[in-house]
Image (spheres, rainbow, N blue to C red):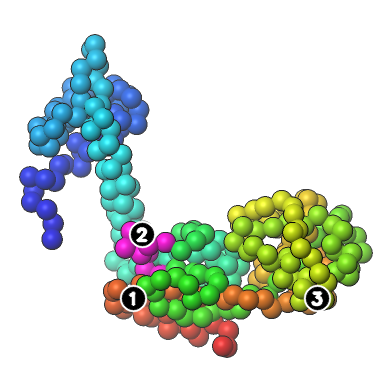
């Protein structure tokens, strides 16, 4: 249920408040909003009268936000951003339906996007929008229809569709390791690059190859793409998933240090919230994505 209109200020007055809080003066806000100083002042006065709480105080010839006004400005900033994003989604989609999908950046770039053209050809009436998230989030707070998730079934309140297993391989710049494939023992002597979302990945890889390794250290990254770039520049060896490693091998920037990929724990899933029914566009997307998934 929408609140009564008396509690809903105009968007123009909220824009004026947000701009004054962010820029520091009504003059700067007026310039950004392409309004006169007096127009901004009228918007602020009308907002204050509607809210019924002092939002500003006079300081010389200027205005300063009260603590309550500053808090209110910060809280409405998210609302204005959500409104802008919603409007942009509608404008971009036009008369078509749209889906907004949260993706892990490397998986989205190298696994999903190459396949997504097939969905676009099959369902030209649906636009799929992608945005990056690196960890699980609250679907009640984020405006996503579904998300790509890696790991186990540890995201609460969602349904799961398995997509792909994780297969990894150590990769390095030919400048760092000219000879290519090397033994795990030799690999242990090289600088190793690590990913925040894969703690213990190197220790697990060495264990699967019969080589004991503990408390490994090295540069830490939050995205596969950054780690791959560092490896290509010679900073160390990266443990990369198949979908990214193969692209790097084709480019020649990296080459494999092992003769095969190693399957590890964890899978890629598409997840969507249990608390609401999947929309028709989402149902079509999930059906198509299921046909693209690896056999379980």
Q: Nearer the viewer, mark 1 or mark 2?
A: 1
Magenta stretch: give its range: 137-146
Q: Is residue 201 left or right of residue 283?
A: right
- Which residue is pictured at 36% across the width and 76% down the height? 282
Image quadrant where one finds the C terminus: bottom right
Q: Is residue 259 left or right of residue 58?
A: right
Instruction: Decide: is 5 above or below 129.
Output: above
Q: Nearer the viewer, mark 3 or mark 2?
A: 3
Res. 169 image quadrant: bottom right
Q: Which residue is mark 1?
A: 274
Q: Position of residue 293 (x, y in %)?
A: 54, 82
- Which residue is pictured at 37% across the width and 68% down the height? 145
Estimate the spatial distance between the alpha carbons at disc 3 and disc 1, rounded to whole Å.
40 Å
- Which residue is pictured at 69% across the width and 66% down the height? 201
Q: Which residue is mark 2?
A: 142
- Which residue is pictured at 61% across the width and 67% down the height? 110
Q: Earlier in the sequence, mark 1 or mark 2?
A: 2
Q: Earlier in the sequence, mark 3 or mark 2?
A: 2
Q: Which residue is mark 3?
A: 209
Q: Secondary structure at mark 3?
A: loop
**Residue farthest to the bottom?**
295
Q: Secondary structure at mark 1?
A: loop
């Amino acid at each position: 249920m929408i609140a009564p209109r008396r509690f809903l200020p105009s968007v123009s007055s909220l824009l004026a408040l947000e701009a004054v809080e962010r820029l520091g003066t009504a003059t700067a806000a007026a310039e950004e909003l392409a309004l006169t100083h007096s127009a901004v002042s009228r918007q602020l006065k009308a907002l204050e009268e509607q809210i019924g709480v002092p939002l500003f105080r006079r300081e010389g010839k200027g205005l300063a936000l009260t603590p309550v006004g500053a808090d209110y400005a910060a809280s409405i900033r998210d609302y204005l951003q959500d409104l802008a994003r919603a409007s942009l989604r509608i404008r971009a989609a036009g008369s078509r339906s749209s889906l907004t999908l949260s993706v892990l950046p490397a998986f989205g770039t190298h696994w999903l996007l190459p396949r997504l053209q097939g969905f676009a050809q099959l369902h030209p009436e649906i636009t799929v929008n992608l945005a990056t998230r690196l960890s699980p989030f609250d679907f009640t707070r984020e405006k996503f229809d579904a998300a790509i998730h890696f790991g186990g079934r540890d995201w609460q309140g969602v349904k799961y569709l398995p997509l792909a297993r994780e297969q990894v391989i150590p990769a390095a710049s030919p400048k760092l390791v000219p000879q290519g494939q090397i033994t795990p023992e030799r690999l242990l002597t090289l600088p190793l690059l690590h990913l925040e979302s894969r703690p213990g990945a190197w220790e697990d890889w060495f264990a699967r190859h019969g080589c004991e390794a503990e408390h490994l250290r090295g540069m830490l990254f939050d995205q596969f793409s950054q780690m791959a770039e560092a490896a290509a520049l010679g900073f160390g060896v990266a443990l990369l998933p198949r979908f990214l490693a193969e692209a790097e091998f084709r480019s020649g920037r990296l080459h494999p240090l092992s003769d095969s990929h190693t399957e590890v724990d964890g899978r890629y899933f598409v997840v969507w919230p249990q608390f609401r029914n999947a929309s028709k566009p989402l149902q079509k997307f999930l059906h198509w994505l299921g046909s693209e998934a690896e056999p379980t």
